Image (spheres, coloured by chain):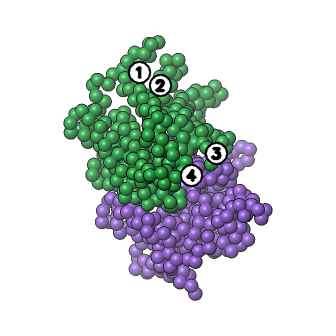
Chain colours: A purple, B green
Amino acid sequence: MSRERMVNAALMALLLGVPLWAWATDEPFTITLATRVAILALAGVGLNIALGLGGLVSLGHAAFFGIGGYAMGILASHAQSYTPLMESPFLLEGTKSMPVIWLVAILASALAALVIGALSLRTSGVYFIMITLAFGQMLYFFSISWPAYGGEDGLSIYLRNGFPGLNTLDPIQFFALCFGCLAAALWFNARLVRSPFGLALNAARQSPERVETVGLGTFRLRLVAFVISGAITGLAGALFADLNRFVSPGMFSWQMSGEIMVFVILGGVGRLYGPVAGAALFITLEHVLGGISPFWHVWLGFLLLLVVLFARGGVIGLLAGRRVAHD
Amino acid sequence: MTPLLFIEQVLNGLQFGVMLFLMAAGLTLVFGVMGLINLAHGSLYMVGAFAAAAVAGWSGSFLLALVAALAASAAAGAIVELTVIRRLYDRDHLDQVLATFALILIFSEGTRWLFGSFPLFLDIPDWLSGPVTLPGGIEYPLYRLAIIAVGLSIATGLFWLIARTRLGIRIRAGESDREMIAALGVDISRLYTIVFALGAALAGLAGAMVGAIQSVQVGMGEPVLILAFVVIVIGGIGSIKGALVGALLVGLTDTLGGLLLPEAFKLFMETSDATATGSALASMLIYILMAVVLVWRPRGLFGGAT
């Protein structure tokens, strides 16, 4: 077992162990914190596919996070007010069922990623960073000024949505669901990296000219990666909205995009479990530093600066040592 | 809608565009010369506004406040360049985005620490307040006209600086080949500090001038920063001319879109629906404009071939 795998296993054991311990000692708040870690890590896993594997620096992933959140908010708000989503051409009802909501969130954010990706991938470099940022802002302002679903105030859902066979209002059971989603996404990501598609994508990041010469279209590879990435982040958005039982335009804000990126970088770019380490560190810092000073973002800023300037492999890089570089 | 209202909105759009130009000029210079993407540019705008508000509150003089804004933001820019930014020039864009995102966190929370969360107010001085009557009987605030005048004269000055002075020649040379001008004996790191401080000073000036119309508060820089990004992407990164055209385009589109779109939708929708749909669409309009420009010309209107 390599050192990185040991670090990864320890990380997952910790993420599973802390809430179980909190459950045994009856500390629901700690379970909620761990649930946030799992959900934000899931959003990071999504971004990491575009960023780490595809080399696509997207500063607009809050768009997909928010779409996932609003998919949940819109479906659940229609279900709780017993009004249909639309009546013509066919009747569409809201729902409180998590699997359906997840499916809608994944499809909606994948569709958005397809459109945003198809337009943004025409550009590269700084232009790509800025156009993804701009698409995120576009949705942000749209969600603020569109009055049908709460506008600036957001949407509150009174009861958490249900999952067959589970009581989602119980913190530990909801945590189990989120942890399950995270584990599934990590498994999928690991398979993806080793698949022919993942190898081609990796190659397209390292040497696009060669990949083109071999006869693979880099645009299509990157677009598929962007769609998968957006879909996973969208699922995280739906879970995040369910955790808070609240969606607001804040989920679309560019600070959200920045924070998701911070999870990935704090943990280590392109490392499979980097987002988990990053999100865990972020939430722990928020909790610990936030208790000491209301201005904890200053210290987060300094820490982030140090990581970017001096510790480029992030947490996983620090613990597991530098990876043998192929690029 | 009357023609008077329309002309007033055109002037508002012009004023907004001119302010955006001051922000975008610094961003595009820094990107063009150093190849650096600086998210913390909005923080320098905020620093300018806070310095102006603090000095105006203490001395009562608006001109002194503007000088303080220029000095404080240029100093903040120079310090940031010397301590952090210069380590980022040969890093990839991802590192630059993150490090400057970290700077935003430090600047925003640091300012909140110093000044508190409540907005400060910066008053328009007496000699610039009140409306003036323009030809055609339009009443328009003198202060906003002054902003347009200041912005346009700075734009002229900047074009002159880039095209005619020795500093401008070095800046353009730095854009095209930094090794070569370093080899020719130009102190490239000092040039970078000067360019960064110049961009910061322009942002600070914009912050101070807008601070007198709106309130001065933490986080005021980021919305403007993102609009400035839209501007330079539309204009083509690195081009001052592109920044000016892009800024005016964005300023006018945003202001007139908010006015015209709800009116246009009223032609075939109910009034309340039309207002909602129109203003929702208007808030997205500049991003749609940017997407259209990028699809049409992926390097912006005045972007170079490389």
Mark 4 = which residue?
A126
Amino acid, disc 4 = Val
Give the SS element for disc 1: strand
* Residue on which the image places disc 3: B305
- Check disc 2 and give the amino acid type: Leu
Callout 1 and callout 3 share a chain: yes
Q: Where is residue B210, by image quadrant?
A: top left
A301 relative position to A112: left or right? left
**Nearer mark to the viewer, of 2 and 3:** 3
In the figure, residue A204 lies in which quadrant?
bottom right
Q: Position of residue B182 (x, y in %)?
A: 47, 53
- Quick one: A246 or B90, which is closer to the camera? B90
Q: Which residue is mark 1?
A: B140
Going by the picture, which residue comes out furthest to the front?
Answer: B184
- Relative to residue B193, is residue A48 drawn left or right? right
Label 4 to label 3: alpha-carbon separation: 15 Å
Q: Residue at x 43, y 42 (%)?
A: B167
Q: Please provide percent x and percent y for residue B25.
A: 47, 40
The three-letter amino acid code for the residue at tag 1 is Tyr
- Mark 2 = which residue? B11
| Labels 1 and 3: the sequence-earlier one | 1
